[in-house]
Every structure is written in C-alpha cells, then in structure tokens.
C-alpha cells in the first residue's frame, strides 16, 4: 500500500445503550497517515419490524421503571415527553405502572396500562388501553417513539395535562340555608355566584371522604376537563349557604319585571345574605347588585344623617328649612317636591330634601363623611362575602364635592349590597359584614367597624326612616307592610342620562334590602316596589 494511497481500514458498529437504535462509524486512514472518524449515513425509510418492537419495549420498560429521562430520550420530542411523563407521575399521582405490550401492526404498537393512583389516603387501580407509533428520527435515523399526548392516554388532547384531585366543583350541590338545592335554571341571577362559591369552598364542603378523580384538563380550565378515572366516589358534597330560596325567588321575580334592576336582601342581626337578584347578571353576566359602582343618590342621606346626629351638627326635631336652591361651591336643587320653609331635620330626611342637607355642609370637616362611612358602616372595609364584591367608596372631598357626597352624588360609589348593609346597620345598630356562607366553617375573615351607632343616634335614625316609610317618599312602596319598618328613597343624577337612577333601601323586622333601577326616575316609584316585594316575603 503506497504512502499517499487511501485505504478503508474498517467499519465499527457501536450500540447506544442510553437510547434506541445504533450509530455506525467508519475509521478512515487519509493520505497523511492520520486517522479520522466519520459518521456513517443515517438509516432511512420506515423502521423495520424488529426496530418497532424493540423501541416500544425499551420505552415502556423505562417508563415502568420511572426513568423519565431514559424514556423521553427514546422519543422524537424529548422535552414534551419528559414534561408529560413527569406530570403523569407527580400530577396524576401514579406511583406504580406496568404495561402489557401487544403485537405491532406496522409502526403502531398497542399496549395496556395498569396504574396505581395514590391521592392522600385514597388508592385505586386504573387500567386502560393505549398505543404508540414508532418512526424514524429525521436527523438521527434512529427508531424512536412518535411522541403524542395520546401515548399517556387515548383521550388526552394536545395542550391538556393529567391531574388527580378532588372532583370538579360542579359535583358539589350548593343549597340554601334550609338545604334546598339552588339551580341557576330556577335562580338565573346566581349563575355566576354559585360556581364561585363552589370554587372557593368546594373542598371544605366535601367532608371526610372527598370525591377524587383523574382528569384531563387544559390550562385555565378550572375543573371543566374530562374525567378519565374515578379514584374514590367520596361522600355526598353539599355546600350550604345563607341564601333563602323563597326570598331568592321573590327577588328574581321583582327584577324580572323591569328592563334593568338589582336587589340584595340581608338579615341585619347576622349579616347573612338572603337573596341577590340582578337583571344584568341574567343577561350579560355582570352582577351589578354585588359589583356595581354608581352614585346612590339620597339613600346616602342615611349615612350623612348618622354623621350629623353623632357629631351634634343636627337634631331630628331641629327646624331646618328646605329651600328650592342652595349654594355650596355650586348651586344645588331638589329632585323631589320637598320645599318646606318650616321643615325639621327629620322631615327633610323623610321628604328627601337635598338643599337642607347641603346647607349643613359648612358644619362638617372634609373627611367626616368618609370616616363615618368607614368607622360605623364598614364601607370600603375589604369585605369577604364569599364571592367577589365591590364594598363601596366614600372618599374625603371638599367644597362642592363634599356637599354632593352628602346627598349621594359626586365621587360616592355604592351598589345594592352596600346600601342594604347601610339599612341593616341602622336596624341592628351595629355593622355586620354581609356574607354568603358560615364564616367559622369556611374561614371567612369578616370586616368589622370601629364602633357601633350610639343608641340615641340609632333611635333617631330608625324614627326618621320609619317616618319616610309611613308618610314620606317611601310611603307608596311600603304601604301594607306592618311591623317595624324603615325606608329611604334616592334619585341619583348621572351625566348625559335623561332620567336619574332610582334607589330604595329599607327594612322590615329582621330583613333589610336595597335596590337600584337605572334610569328609573323617582326611587320610590321604581326601586321601591322591588324592595317591598322582598320585604313582604322575608
């Protein structure tokens, strides 16, 4: 052999022990007498039957041993396979898995799975059939598993993962205070409320033996995926709320009679929410009864009156004229036919006189109304009701803004939930944060006020609200309701809106409620009948 002659010395086949297939290398002696190593051409074409069988066997064996890295390396998508197999072990809680490999048909290999699923104290054997396909690696030429989610389970779609845990919230029956099942078909305003309660408190409602299952879920599905295996049926799950099905039906009927309306019903002595109904929640999904942020109009005068009485800036029987106009930073007028030069403060309240209240703006500090709202009525106190709510806003303001806030305009923002709570606080004398579920059982941290209403102030407010209910602007709506009653109307002006929003809040016995009817006009005529309807059955 010449010195510059080129000769092939030999060919060596090297087995790759960490993965499937093999790599061939050629040792070449070049003309300079040195040796270099070149990769032989990669295998091409479909995998041979022997390769299909061997690759499937090695992959399933590695998976069975729990060697995720080895199993994933035997696929054509190592990162995806590694993540999925890790999730199978950690998220689906599979502690042991064995396989029965079937006869291949072409590149497809069927197999059976026997998995032991362990979730806390619950254990179950999960058996099912699946399959895999073996393909030729595009660059390596090796026979590898064509990685697809269906390798893990035939019903697993792309983007889904397997998870084992308590069953979906939809399996939990949400009931009213007496154990009657609440169905959105019967109570459409609760369409969003019931799922949120299930999601937040479902696990605590399942008892000692929860329903546990293996599910296929897409990101963000929140329990709406596919059930693949039931680990444990568990005990019957019931989530009991403070709602009253009878009052809820009355509330639904009351708002349904109007194009737009919202109402909330509470028990003053406990803060329990008895009913929530909202036309918008039934149509568009937004529950203004709990999430609304609008000016409450003259219903806010309940809080303003409490502040004035408590600070000694007014007395119930004090003469306080109600003129047609008054100026404090800007000119204010009345929305009611309430002018009375010989009125008392209580009569101004019952007639809903804006100008009388604005005339007292100079007697209070800019932050007084905000402090009263927060410290006595709990407004803006980060309420934990059990669902997402807006808990009111009464910012400190000065000048015309302060005067506007006193009559429920300006920057004041409320909804039927907060205004029902205002009426309930007057009725009981103490703020009790509204809630949907038992605070002790479900771990709600209820907001508290800094102080209760002083007894003399509470007595004066109840007398003024009774005067409104029996002979003031609330008399028509409250007619025929006996017992201990109180009310306050409101008409809130909104920019570029032809008619004001109608508001009404009141109580009867140990039931308080508030309602708003957008563009309803006079609150006693629009929102008043809604409140009266629920107080009648509450």
Image (cartoon, rainbow, N blue to C red):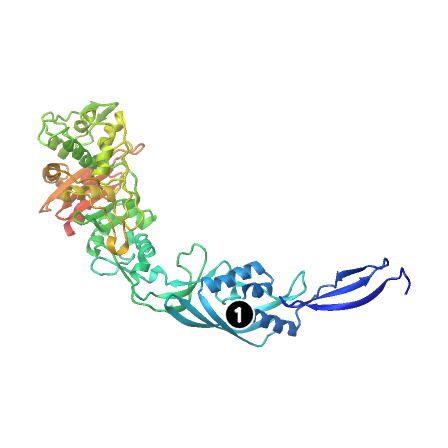
Is 216 left, or right, of 205 in this rendering? right
Residue at horizontal 85 percent and vertical 57 percent from the top: 32
Of 274 and 333, which appears nearest the observer? 274
Residue 35: percent from left, percent from top: 80, 60
Q: Quadrant of residue 355?
A: top left
Of 535 and 266, which appears nearest the observer? 266
Q: Quadrant of residue 108?
A: bottom right
Residue 262: percent from left, percent from top: 25, 45
The number of numbered badges drawn on the structure is: 1
How many residues crowd mark 1 within 10 Å: few (<14), some (14–19), many (20+)? few
Which quadrant would the N terminus be assigned to in this image?
A: bottom right
Residue at horizontal 34 percent and vertical 56 percent from the top: 199
- From where the camera sits, is residue 537 visible? yes
Secondary element at tag 1: helix
Q: Quadrant of residue 317?
A: top left
Q: Relative to 485, does residue 499 appear above or below in the rendering?
A: above
Q: Which residue is mark 1?
A: 65
Of 311 and 424, which appears nearest the observer? 311
Q: Relative to 182, does residue 123 appear above or below in the rendering?
A: below
Is 302 left, or right, of 389 in this rendering? left
Farthest-out residue, right: 2
- From where the camera sits, is residue 106 visible? no
Residue 405: percent from left, percent from top: 24, 31
Residue 126: percent from left, percent from top: 44, 71
Q: Relative to 159, does residue 531 appear above or below in the rendering?
A: above
Q: Relative to 523, does residue 67 appear above or below in the rendering?
A: below
Of 421 and 529, which appears nearest the observer? 421
């Amino acid at each position: 052999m010449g010195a510059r002659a080129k000769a092939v010395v030999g060919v060596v086949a090297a087995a790759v022990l960490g993965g499937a297939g093999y790599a061939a290398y050629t040792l070449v002696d070049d003309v300079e007498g040195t040796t270099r190593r070149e990769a032989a051409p990669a295998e091409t074409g479909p995998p041979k039957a022997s390769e299909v069988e061997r690759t499937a066997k090695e992959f399933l064996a590695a998976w069975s041993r729990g060697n995720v890295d080895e199993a994933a390396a035997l696929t054509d998508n190592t990162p995806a396979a590694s993540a999925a197999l890790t999730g199978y072990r950690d998220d689906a809680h599979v502690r042991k898995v064995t396989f029965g490999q079937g006869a291949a048909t072409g590149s497809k290999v069927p197999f059976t799975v026997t998995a032991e699923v362990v979730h806390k104290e619950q254990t179950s054997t999960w058996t099912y059939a699946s399959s895999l396909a073996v393909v030729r690696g595009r660059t390596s030429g090796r026979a590898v598993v064509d990685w697809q989610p269906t390798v893990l389970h035939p019903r697993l779609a792309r983007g889904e993962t397997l998870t084992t845990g308590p069953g979906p919230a939809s399996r939990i029956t949400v009931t009213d205070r007496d154990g009657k099942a609440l169905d959105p078909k019967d109570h459409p305003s609760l369409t969003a409320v019931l799922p949120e309660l299930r999601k937040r408190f479902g696990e605590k409602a399942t008892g000692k033996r929860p329903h546990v299952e293996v599910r296929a879920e897409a990101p963000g599905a929140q329990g709406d995926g596919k059930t693949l295996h039931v680990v444990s049926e568990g005990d019957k799950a019931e989530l009991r709320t403070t709602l009253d099905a009878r009052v809820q039906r009355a509330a639904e009927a009351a708002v349904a009679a109007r194009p737009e309306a919202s109402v909330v019903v509470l028990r003053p002595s406990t803060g329990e929410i008895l009913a929530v109904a909202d036309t918008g929640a039934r149509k568009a999904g937004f529950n203004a009864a709990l999430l609304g942020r609008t000016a409450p109009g003259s219903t806010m005068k309940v809080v303003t009156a409490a502040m004035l009485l408590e600070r000694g800036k007014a007395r119930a029987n004090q003469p306080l004229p109600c003129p047609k106009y008054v100026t404090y930073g800007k000119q204010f007028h009345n929305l009611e036919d309430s002018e009375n030069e010989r009125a008392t403060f209580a009569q101004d309240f019952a007639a809903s006189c804006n100008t009388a209240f604005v005339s007292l703006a100079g007697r209070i500090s800019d932050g007084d109304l905000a402090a009263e709202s927060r410290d006595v009525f709990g407004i803006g106190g980060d309420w934990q009701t059990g669902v997402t709510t807006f808990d009111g806003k009464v910012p400190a303001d000065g000048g015309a803004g302060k005067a506007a806030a006193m009559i429920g305009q300006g920057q004041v923002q409320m909804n039927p939930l907060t205004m029902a709570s205002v009426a309930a606080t007057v009725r009981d004398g103490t703020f009790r944060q509204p809630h949907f579920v038992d605070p002790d059982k479900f771990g709600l941290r209820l907001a508290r006020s800094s102080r209760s209403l002083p007894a003399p102030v509470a007595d004066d407010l109840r007398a003024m609200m009774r005067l409104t209910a029996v002979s003031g602007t609330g008399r028509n709506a409250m007619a025929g309701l006996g017992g201990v009653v109180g009310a306050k109307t409101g008409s809130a002006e909104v920019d570029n809106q032809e008619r004001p929003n109608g508001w009404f809040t009141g109580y009867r016995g140990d039931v308080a409620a508030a309602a708003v009817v957008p563009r309803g006009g006079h609150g006693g005529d629009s929102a008043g009948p809604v409140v009266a309807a629920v107080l009648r059955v509450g």
